[in-house]
Amino acid sequence: MVLSIVTIEKPEAVNFILGQSHFIKTVEDMHEAVVQANSAMLFGLAFCESSGPALVRYSGNNAALIDLAKKNALALSCGHSFILFMENGFPINILNAVKNLPEVCRIFCATANPVEVIVAETEQGRGIMGVIDGVASKGIESEADIVQRKIFLRTIGYKL
């Protein structure tokens, strides 16, 4: 087995969800779930088929995000993995819709942070072992940090 790191390439502000699913039907079902959960969201989705022709399957409503998804999915080339890039919304807006798809097995991350994906490769193929999402913790929040966190969440409308 060979371990390697694949860095997700994306613009800094773009959010994405990286996960694992078990069926080619994922592409159409996830497209429908995203549109139903947030019709204003722009997105690009790619899914790595793990048998037969083993193609990167894709969908979305924004050509640049679709291209970004295809490029990163091909770089990963891990069977049954999917990557969903989004604008005009955040993972929190669609994450439950994605997780509730019957074919979705797991979510590795949902973030705008820099991400490195730890990939294992054997003679059979490639698989995601885990992710490095962002940076290491730098300390414990102070009382002032708590106040700032609470103000921020209310300013962006996620808390009352």
Image (cartoon, helix red, strand yellow):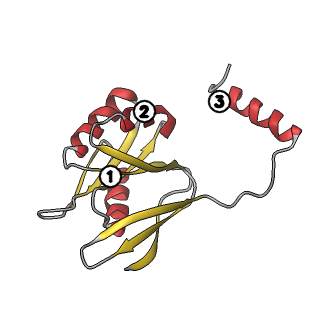
Q: Residue 131, position in %: x, y?
A: 50, 61
Q: Name the image quarter holding the C terminus.
A: top right
* Residue 100 showing in the rendered view: yes
Placement of 146 over or under 7, stated as above or below: above
Query: Who comes first in sequence, dot 1 or dot 3?
Result: 1
Q: What distance separates the C-alpha of mark 2 from that of mark 1?
A: 21 Å
Q: Residue 13, position in %: x, y?
A: 55, 50
Q: Name the image quarter holding the N terminus.
A: bottom left
Query: Who comes first in sequence, dot 3 or dot 2?
Result: 2
Q: Residue 103, position in %: x, y?
A: 27, 42
Placement of 2 over or under 48, stated as above or below: below
Residue at coordinates 21% horizontally, 58% vertically from top-left?
49
Query: Who comes first in sequence, dot 2 or dot 1?
Result: 1
Q: What distance separates the C-alpha of mark 3 from that of mark 2?
A: 20 Å
Relative to the observer, which residue lies in front, 92 or 99?
A: 99
- How crowded is the residue under tag 1: few (<14 C-alpha within 10 Å), some, or many (20+)? many
Residue tagged by mark 3? Answer: 156
Residue at coordinates 66% horizontally, 24% vertically from top-left?
159
Residue tagged by mark 1? Answer: 66
Q: Secondary structure at mark 1?
A: helix
Q: Amino acid at mark 3?
A: Ile
Residue tagged by mark 2? Answer: 96
Q: Amino acid at mark 1?
A: Ile
Q: Secondary structure at mark 3?
A: loop
* Residue 90 showing in the rendered view: no
Q: What distance separates the C-alpha of mark 1 from that of mark 3?
A: 27 Å
Q: Nearer the viewer, mark 3 or mark 2?
A: 2
